[in-house]
Amino acid sequence: MTDVPRLVLSAPSSGHGKNALAIGLLAALAERGVDVAGFKLGPDHVDAAYLGLASGRPGRVIDPRLVGVDRLAPLVAHGAAGAGLAVVQGSMGLYDSVGGRPEQESTAAAAAALRSPVVLVVDVAAMGQSVAALVHGFRSYDEQLWLGGVILNRVASSRHEGMLREALDDVGVPVYGALRRQDLPAVLPSRRHGVVPVVGGSADAVRAVRRLGEAVAATVDLERLLGLARSAPPLPASGWSPEEALGGVSAPATRPLVALAGGPGGSYSHPETAELLRAAGAEVVVVDPLRDEALPAGTRALVVGGALPEAYAEQLSANRRLCIAVAELARTGRPVVAEGAGLLWLARELDGLPMCGVLDAVGVSRDGLVVGYREATAQTDSVVAASGTVLVGHKEHRAVLTPRSGPRPAWSWDGGTPEGFVWRNVHASQLTLHWAGHPATAARLVAAAAPAESGPVPAGPGGVPA
């Protein structure tokens, strides 16, 4: 059991402003000196990155499909250790689930697993007294739900606000704040930039977060919200530990240096990736694929996480020195794990632009977006998983690769042809994993990267460490 004051922010559906509200709430409380932590329910790296920027500590993705329902509370306890408030930003509507399993994967189900009060953000721009019926319906739909109150967004006037508050008071629902239509402007950088403004330390991103914090501080009763968060019972779990997750894996005698693609503001991987790599015995150093012209001295492995945006193909291609260094690292048999756009970076070219040339494949961007979860089976022994291992990952990409897979595919799943490439110690696929859901990947990669003098490494088929 772990004491963590916490709130889950949700909404009737997407588009009510809960993302901007969550970021602003964290920024407003951080400005007041409260140690805060932000979490994104669902696979969205971008929202998590801005929650992290607002809180001053890593924003974390907690996704029941990717990490398992039983890990939600431990991951929150871990990521919010020592914090005075944890804010979990929900996904879509309160009872929605992309995978069709709302009883396990909806925001409401996550709130129940976390024993957390829910604050509903409601866009009331075209609504009057009916807000009471809407909120009452959400509260009554699930008797296990703890609806702590609402925050009203896009209120038209003081008279409008009074009408809404009176209606909600009639059904006994507290109102923690009311924002006017102009209070949450669209100040965040375009989503086409992905997490780059955060990872790269963009001043525009910092200003945008500060602006949202100022708006929330001026319109939301922060003390009452903190009081609600502090009324949450202890989390029903102790904090997740990367060491415990690895099950006591012995670290190599010499710590191999693993380069993690990112920038001064973080990496393109989930924060747990670096934590697991360190726990497995690696030294982790960030390399910026957009700016750094060389890998860190002594690099023995490279990990490119799935949050690297496809929109930066020109910058990736222009960094020829680093492309050559990555190709040489792969050619010499060092482990390289590339997810999402990282696979495109390793290809021969993308949209006519030369890339690293590690893989004999060509990428082309298309208008349609491929998005969704995949229950994938490893087709080849690799540094990521043993052949036959079944894992759940997430895909979100526009570019497609020809061929879709190499002679040794990375994954297969129902309804699709094999995908991805395993070549020497390279594992590349557009499927993104959450390593907290499969911590053995960190141990396999570190074992494959360890210098020979650290002792023999048991090998599986094809020379891949078991």
Image (cartoon, rainbow, N blue to C red):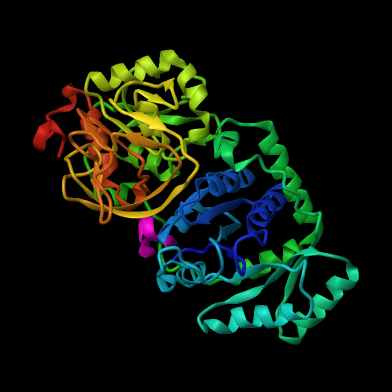
Q: In this view, does 450 lie to the left or right of 140?
A: left
Residue 66 in the image: state x and y as whole percent: 37, 55
The secondary structure that most of the magenta stretch takes on is helix
Residue 215 in the image: state x and y as whole percent: 78, 52
78 up-or-down from 452: above or below = below
158 up-or-down from 241: above or below = below
Residue 87 in the image: state x and y as whole percent: 58, 58
In the depicted view, which residue is nearer to us: 127 or 460? Answer: 127
66 up-or-down from 450: above or below = below
Tell me the quarter of the picture where residue 406 sits: top left
406 up-or-down from 70: above or below = above
Q: Which residue is drawn at 69% across and 52% down?
A: 24
Whether residue 118 appears in this view of the structure is yes
Q: In this view, does 386 lie to the left or right of 55?
A: left
In the depicted view, which residue is nearer to us: 357 or 455? Answer: 357
Q: In this view, does 277 lie to the left or right of 156?
A: left
Name the quarter where the N terminus is drawn.
bottom left
Q: Which residue is drawn at 42% across and 74% down?
A: 103
Tell me the quarter of the picture where residue 164 sits: bottom right
Magenta stretch, residue numbers: 65-72
In the depicted view, which residue is nearer to us: 100 or 234? Answer: 100
Name the quarter where the C terminus is drawn.
top left
Q: Is residue 284 left or right of residue 316?
A: left
**Extreme bottom residue here?**
170
